[in-house]
Amino acid sequence: MIRFKNVSKSFGKDSHNSALKNINLEIGAGEFVSFIGASGAGKSTMLKMLIGESKPDNGGEIWIEDIRVDKVKSEFLPYLRRRIGVIFQDFKLLQSRTVYENVSLAMEVAGASKKEIQRDVPKLLDLVGIASKADSYPNELSGGQKQRVSIARALSHNPILLIADEPTGNLDKANTYDIITLLLKIHNSGTTVLLATHNQEVVDKLKKRVITVQNGEVVLDQEVGKYYI
Ligand SMILES: Nc1ncnc2c1ncn2[C@@H]1O[C@H](COP(=O)(O)OP(=O)(O)OP(=O)(O)O)[C@@H](O)[C@H]1O
Ligand SMILES: [Mg+2]
């Protein structure tokens, strides 16, 4: 489903300063894959390539199903991004909007009808366990609750792929566990999930495929991973 072919990336003119070095990788539909590695290893750069936010240097190819992502014209990127849900460490919620509106507005922007919005938002809030906070504003929520809202939003357009870049970076242990459990639930419903994290315990507990990135290279790719660095 996902393929990185000869993917390198340098920032600036200094080619020694490369963020990614000849990455070749295949990820099947329905997999749950964690990317681990030290800060600056290249995890986010890899994930950004899947939404066209970063492009490989010449010769590299990024594929999602039969779409060559690095060749998608910028005017078509929004359509690609609707098939992918993305969640971040810092949630990126609209502060002046309620929990309900954060999800409903995302659906509206993506072209959903009023009827679909009324039908789906309560279901999504239920799924992530935040229905009782529908009318609260983000600053009235805990970190774990905020991340649930951002997951509900990411799921609102039924993505085939969910990308979670350090989603538990701002959370305590209990909330981290809850969010990871939620990601597993989403994965079990058939969505491909990619997770970038520093969190050793999370990766060890997941017992899913783990790709270790070090200095821009994939140094380890394990079926059932443990954290080694
Ligand atoms: N827009 C950019 N301009 C210049 N250099 C960048 C840019 N984005 C990333 N880099 C560099 O690329 C390398 C990889 O960064 P990346 O953000 O992918 O790391 P990461 O593994 O996600 O780290 P972290 O765990 O801290 O999030 C780093 O050396 C970083 O400084
Ligand atoms: Mg990162």
Image (cartoon, rainbow, N blue to C red):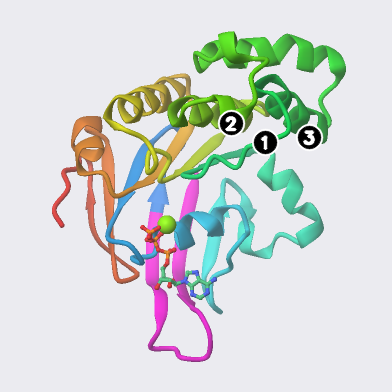
Which stretch appears magenta? Answer: 1-25
**Amino acid under label 2?**
Asn
Q: Residue at x 58, y 65 (%)?
A: 54
Left or right: residue 49 compared with residue 83: left
**Amino acid under label 1?**
Gln
Label 2, label 1: how far apart the Cα atoms are: 7 Å
Q: Which residue is mark 1?
A: 95
Q: Which residue is mark 2?
A: 139
**Mark 1 residue crowding within 10 angstroms, few (<14) / some (14–19) / many (20+):** few
**Mark 3 residue crowding within 10 angstroms, few (<14) / some (14–19) / many (20+):** some
Residue 223 image position (x, y, % from top left): 22, 41
Instruction: First in sequence, mark 3 or 1: give its number.
Output: 1
At mark 2, the secondary structure is: helix
At mark 3, the secondary structure is: loop
Residue 121 image position (x, y, % from top left): 69, 16
Q: Which mark identifies residue 110?
A: 3
Q: Residue at x 68, y 29 (%)?
A: 157
